[in-house]
Amino acid sequence: MGKRTVRIKVPRHRPGDLLRLAQRILEKSTIDGVSCPITPADLANMQSLIDSALVARNHSIELREESEGEMQVARAAMGTEKGQTSSTPNTISYLVSKMRDVLIATYRGREEQLSQYGFNVVVNAYVPKGKGNKSVT
């Protein structure tokens, strides 16, 4: 008969699974009573930590849900929500595009001026190719 290898994994990177395992250990230890090999001090400490973790985890989940709701409001205002485009009225994206167009018309031929407003302006100069002429960037 070959050598027997046993692995018993602790789900360290799955908090929900880890909490469920800890709760099952406590349940089984309670059923076993005095015959349980785990010390009462460790069991009491585990219960305290589970209680603390559950409160913090539930609070964190509530905050995440609230945060996601707030982020959806922000994305809608920015015009980056699913289904929105730069043509969606009353959004930051719409107004920035509209203002960019006004500024382009105002500074036609001097588009570099838009950089003063925070736009990233890239100007490429093109000279038609011919004898000795090359494209200039």
Image (cartoon, helix red, strand yellow):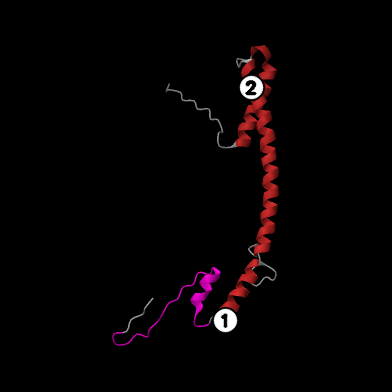
Mark 2 = which residue? 45
Which SS does the magenta portion mostly show?
loop
Placement of 137 over or under 55, stated as above or below: below
Specify few, some or many for label 2: CA neighbours under 10 Å numbering under 14, 14-19, or 20 or more. Answer: few
Label 1 element class: helix
Q: Residue furthest top?
A: 34
As for residue 98 lying within the magenta part, the answer is no
Camera-nearest residue between 57 and 15: 57
The image shows residue 58 at horizontal and vertical percentages of 69, 38
Camera-nearest residue between 110 and 78: 110
The image shows residue 55 at horizontal and vertical percentages of 69, 34
Q: Residue furthest bottom?
A: 131
Placement of 69 over or under 46, stated as above or below: below
Mark 1 = which residue? 106
- Quadrant of the image for the N terminus? top left
* Quadrant in the picture for residue 84: bottom right
- Write the residue at 65% across / 72% down: 87
The residue range painted magenta reads: 108-132
